[in-house]
Image (cartoon, rainbow, N blue to C red):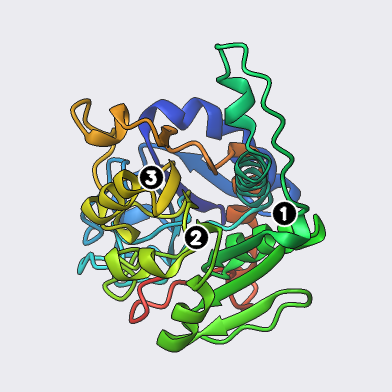
């Protein structure tokens, strides 16, 4: 009997996902009906995005799992109608996209590329950057995305420190944990990359106190979650010169309001939440693999811990 798979992502992405999901399920050896309009009581699995049409999971009495297309689950993890297992998205496309975006912006700030790109006054002022091994980079968050970014930066020679709430061990990375570890990780950091999940414990992890721990003129790069930053504290640090630049891809309110101070600030680069977009082809492969695993009685990948919030 065929499995009924409901696509409950953003409606305008259905045409993109229809062929990739169909192909992924076929390659996984699964007989599946994949549609965006199945009767709730007949659905076996829900392919889900928080900006899609499903907010109340109560009618989906037969559903075995909700498979999110997003890496972040803060918009759904507290939904009391969602009682079945929930997985988050970690896939090759998401990880590779994040690695490329983070590496590009770390190198941009490390090399001081803006200085030359924006030089319109014909100033001949040679500034030689330090070697990567002389640049202290801290990555906050060592999950799948944080880890791959930290490893890539270390492979380029950067002096990389990683911090996570639970202790991790990664070859070539100084890994710290806990409150004391956070202070140590940020003390003297010259480039800080934020890749933590958003929870009550990580909100405003970048604040007036933690900003003061960083090296004078440090750079903040945030492709993680907007609420990780106390915006007023960051703006104050940018104005004082404690932070020389912030490259921000995520915000508390998105799209970022046109009157937000970040848009006009000369030391802020705004990118429109593009650091790690979910790709239909690679995410479909993860969705199909998780359904295959569950049907075979194997543990699903990237199962969300409701208590931890991710």
Location of the N terminus (image quadrant): bottom right
Residue placed at 53% from the left, 75% from the top? 185
Please tell me which residue is depicted at 55% across the width and 69% down the height of the picture. 302
Depth check, mark 1 against mark 3: the one in front is 3
| Nearer to us: label 1 or label 2 | 2
Left of 184 or right of it: where is 105?
A: right
SS at mark 1? loop
* Residue 291 shows in the view: no
**Of 263 and 65, the residue lying toward us:** 263
How far apart are the alpha carbons under marks 1 and 2? Answer: 31 Å
Q: Residue visible at 32% across and 57% down? A: 229
The residue at 37%/63% (across/down) is 211
Please say if the residues under marks 1 and 3 sit with CB atoms less than 8 Å apart.
Answer: no
Q: Which residue is mark 2?
A: 195
Q: Earlier in the sequence, mark 1 or mark 2?
A: 1
Report the Cα–Cα distance between label 3 and label 2: 11 Å
Could you tell whether 231 is left or right of 310 in the image?
Answer: left
Q: Position of residue 195 (x, y in %)?
A: 50, 60
Please tell me the numbered disc located at residue 28.
1
Query: Picture quarter containing residue 307?
Result: bottom left
Q: Nearer the viewer, residue 229 or 217?
A: 217
What is the quadrant of residue 145 in the picture? bottom right
- Is the residue marked by circle 2 packed among few (<14), some (14-19), or many (20+) residues within 10 Å? many
Q: Let me know if residue 229 appears in the view.
A: yes
Q: Secondary structure at mark 3?
A: loop
Depth check: give the residue in front, 142 or 108: 108
- Identify residue for label 3: 250
Residue 258's spot in the image, x, y percent? 22, 25
How many tags in the picture? Answer: 3
Place residue 107 in its image quadrant. top right
Q: Is residue 205 above or below residue 114?
A: below
Task: Determine whether 124 is above or below 44 in the image.
Answer: above
């Amino acid at each position: 009997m065929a499995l009924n798979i409901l696509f409950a992502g953003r409606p305008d992405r259905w045409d993109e996902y229809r062929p990739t999901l169909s192909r992924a399920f076929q390659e996984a050896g699964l007989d599946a009906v994949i549609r965006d309009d199945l009767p709730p009581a007949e659905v076996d699995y829900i392919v889900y995005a928080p900006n899609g049409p499903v907010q109340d999971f109560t009618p989906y009495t037969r559903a075995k799992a909700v498979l999110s297309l997003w890496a972040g689950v803060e918009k759904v993890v507290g939904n009391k109608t969602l009682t079945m297992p929930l997985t988050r998205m970690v896939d090759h496309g998401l990880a590779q996209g994040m690695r490329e975006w983070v590496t590009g912006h770390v190198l941009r700030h490390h090399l001081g590329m803006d200085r030359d790109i924006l030089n319109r006054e014909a100033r001949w002022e040679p500034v030689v950057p330090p070697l990567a091994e002389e640049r202290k980079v801290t990555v906050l968050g060592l999950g799948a995305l944080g880890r791959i970014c930290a490893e890539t930066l270390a492979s380029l020679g950067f002096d990389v420190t990683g911090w996570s709430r639970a202790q991790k061990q990664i070859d070539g990375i100084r890994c710290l944990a806990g409150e004391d570890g956070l202070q140590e990780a940020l003390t003297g950091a010259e480039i800080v990359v934020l890749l933590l999940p958003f929870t009550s414990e990580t909100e405003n992890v970048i604040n007036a106190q933690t900003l003061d721990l960083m090296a004078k003129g440090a750079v903040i790069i945030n492709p993680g979650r907007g609420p990780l930053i106390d915006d007023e504290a960051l703006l104050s640090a940018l104005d004082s010169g404690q932070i020389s630049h912030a490259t921000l891809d995520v915000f508390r309110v998105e799209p970022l309001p046109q009157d937000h101070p970040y848009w006009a600030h000369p030391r802020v680069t705004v990118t429109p939440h593009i650091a790690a977009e979910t790709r239909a082809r690679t995410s479909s492969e993860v969705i199909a693999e998780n359904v295959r695993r569950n049907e075979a009685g194997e543990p699903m990948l990237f199962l969300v811990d409701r208590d931890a919030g991710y």
